[in-house]
């Protein structure tokens, strides 16, 4: 056994080499020490730290475990063992080690921070938030803790609080690029787009998550209708990350919004590569048809994707596919089955999920514009291409009773789970003051949000709820009103496909299919568009609607 002074000197030698980055020499020094003193806890601990630095976390656990067994009151060793367990995703053991470290050192800010990371990774967000806040209480300038606190708040959709936390992170460490990027995301979610762009620019200058920052910067520019800059930002993201599907997709949306269909439809195919895309790519043995093969005497399966409104808008291409000599099968969700029975060009409609007959080619509905090389000046705008049935109209006419006033169908909110719902939907209480008693108003929504349920019962609007079973009922109601007024939902597409006079109320940053700076739709000749101004508010839209209703036949002008 060496004298304690000699062992201490050898350990200090290893530690000095370690701190200088001479890791191999440090390892040799620690191993010499263990050869002389096999049970030396500190040397074993530091060998474990070296193993972590080389990302050999299993070896790190093995070595540091020996160290803490020999010296269980070493808070740093307990902490480092927790880090190794965390990297191995052995989260329960990591939590136990961090707790041991905190018990030994109640002011151990890094232990609270890393325990919070584990709690966050395992979905225990409230507990994680408490630990991040404890770390900040101990170390108020702990920038990473402020940043990660913001991430938890963001996961809880507490965007204002998240933004404030990111601001604290950037104040504590101005060169923390990830905090600038996260702040940009929070500000964009809050609709503070100019500020978001400034934060993304700061992240880009610090080279933090640069491709994502350029992409999300493009989204903020798109919200401001600064299309050329948005496209340039997406291009910058793609230049950094050549297979960045989200950036290609976002560029496609912007191009389509601007009417550049030649480029837009091609890039729209990147949707299948996106992790967050809502539709599953269909892996059929039969080839995808994109206009590159003759279809005479061939059977083509067209299949729905994305939302119901998308299917209603693009099912019109079935007639064009048939015109190429094809036998057309159309697979759609159940709510569209009876409605699409009237669709020209389709030989058989199949409910999604049912067994498929034999076919030669397939094409998703939203790839058909690419297949037909659709351009803005050549849109297949023939309407109506859908129709209600006489029995359905008769049934609903009996329910509605005699007509005493012009009838207007209303839709003011869509699917609450849609990512753009806050922008596209409105509250019933905001709409009601703009409705004139000169009309009979019919609700075309099947679902009613809790906040609107009481108001609808005391309003002048007739609501049928569950009596509307599917889109064939909605189509019949559309045909029995004189005008449909809708926010951007599937009912707006349905009314346009039926050729009904339709007024669509749009947010300032609309879905791509409504384009920019026009009050008509090349997709639906019977549609008139009412757009929010830069204030992004509904009153000006509703005031224009009310004014135009006065001039509508029978509207009290």
Image: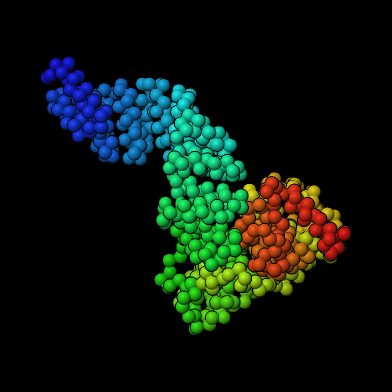
Left or right: residue 48 versus residue 82 is left
Q: In the rendered image, is residue 461 in sight?
A: no
Name the foreground residue: 248 vs 447: 248
Residue at 42% across, 56% down: 243
> Residue 234 in the image: x percent, y percent?
50, 53
Please identify the residue farthest to the left as the structure is shown. Answer: 1
> Residue 486 in the image: x percent, y percent?
70, 58
Please identify the residue farthest to the right as the structure is shown. Answer: 556
**Image: 46 above or below 398:** above
Identify the image quadrant of residue 51: top left
Colour scheme of the picture: rainbow
Please state, as top left, top right, bottom left or bottom right, where the C terminus lies in the image: bottom right
> Residue 92 in the image: x percent, y percent?
37, 35
**Image: 554 above or below 382:** above
Residue at 80% across, 54% down: 546
**Image: 548 above or below 5:** below
Residue at 45% across, 28% down: 142
Identify the image quadrant of residue 498: bottom right
Left or right: residue 371 versus residue 339 is left
Name the foreground residue: 384 vs 458: 384
Please state, as top left, top right, bottom left or bottom right, where the N terminus lies in the image: top left
> Residue 115 in the image: x percent, y percent?
41, 32
* Labels in figure, total: 0
Name the foreground residue: 132 vs 472: 132
Name the foreground residue: 494 vs 511: 511
Residue at 41% across, 56% down: 242
Q: In the rendered image, is residue 499 in sight?
A: yes
């Amino acid at each position: 056994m060496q004298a304690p002074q000699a062992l201490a000197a050898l350990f200090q030698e290893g530690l000095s080499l370690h701190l200088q980055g001479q890791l191999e020499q440090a390892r040799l020094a620690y191993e010499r020490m263990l050869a002389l003193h096999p049970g030396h806890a500190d040397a074993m601990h530091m060998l474990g730290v070296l193993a972590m630095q080389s990302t050999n976390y299993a070896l790190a656990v093995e070595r540091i475990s020996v160290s803490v067994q020999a010296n269980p009151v070493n808070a740093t060793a307990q902490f480092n063992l927790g880090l190794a367990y965390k990297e191995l995703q052995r989260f329960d053991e990591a939590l136990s080690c961090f707790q041991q470290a905190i018990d030994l050192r109640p002011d151990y800010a890094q232990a609270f921070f890393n325990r919070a990371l584990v709690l966050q990774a395992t979905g225990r967000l409230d507990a994680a938030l408490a630990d991040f806040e404890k770390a900040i209480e101990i170390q108020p300038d702990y920038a990473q803790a402020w940043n990660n606190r913001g991430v938890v708040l963001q996961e809880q959709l507490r965007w204002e609080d998240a933004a404030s936390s990111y601001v604290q992170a950037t104040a504590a460490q101005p060169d923390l690029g990830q905090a600038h990027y996260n702040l940009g995301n929070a500000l964009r979610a809050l609709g503070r787009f100019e500020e978001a762009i400034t934060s993304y620019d700061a992240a880009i200058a610090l080279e933090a998550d640069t491709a994502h920052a350029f992409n999300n910067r493009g989204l903020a520019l798109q919200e401001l209708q600064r299309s050329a800059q948005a496209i340039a930002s997406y291009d910058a993201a793609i230049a950094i990350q050549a297979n960045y599907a989200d950036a290609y997709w976002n560029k496609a949306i912007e191009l389509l919004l601007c009417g550049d269909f030649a480029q837009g439809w091609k890039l729209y195919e990147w949707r299948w590569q996106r992790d967050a895309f809502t539709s599953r790519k269909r892996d059929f043995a039969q080839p995808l048809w994109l206009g590159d093969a003759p279809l005479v005497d061939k059977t083509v399966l067209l299949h729905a994707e994305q939302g119901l409104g998308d299917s209603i808008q693009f099912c019109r291409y079935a007639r064009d596919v048939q015109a190429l000599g094809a036998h057309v099968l159309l697979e759609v969700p159940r709510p569209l089955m009876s409605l699409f029975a009237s669709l020209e060009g389709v030989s058989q409609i199949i409910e999604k999920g049912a067994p498929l007959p034999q076919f030669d080619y397939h094409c998703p509905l939203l790839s058909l514009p690419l297949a037909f090389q659709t351009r803005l000046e050549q849109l297949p705008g023939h309407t109506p291409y859908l129709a209600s049935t006489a029995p359905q109209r008769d049934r609903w006419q009996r329910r509605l009773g005699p007509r005493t006033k012009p009838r207007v169908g209303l839709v003011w909110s869509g699917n609450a789970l849609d990512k753009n719902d806050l922008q596209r939907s409105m509250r019933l209480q905001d709409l009601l003051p703009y409705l004139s008693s000169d009309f009979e108003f019919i609700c075309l929504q099947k679902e009613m949000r809790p906040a609107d349920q009481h108001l609808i019962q005391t309003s002048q609007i007739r609501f049928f709820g569950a009596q509307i079973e599917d889109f064939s009922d909605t189509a019949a109601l559309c045909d029995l009103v004189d005008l449909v007024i809708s926010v951007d939902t599937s009912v707006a597409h349905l009314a346009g496909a039926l050729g009904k006079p339709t007024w669509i109320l749009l947010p300032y940053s609309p879905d791509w299919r409504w384009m920019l700076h026009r009050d008509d739709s090349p997709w639906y000749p019977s549609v008139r568009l009412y757009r929010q101004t830069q204030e992004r508010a509904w009153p000006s839209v509703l005031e224009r609607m009310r004014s135009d209703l006065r001039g509508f036949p029978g509207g009290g002008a």
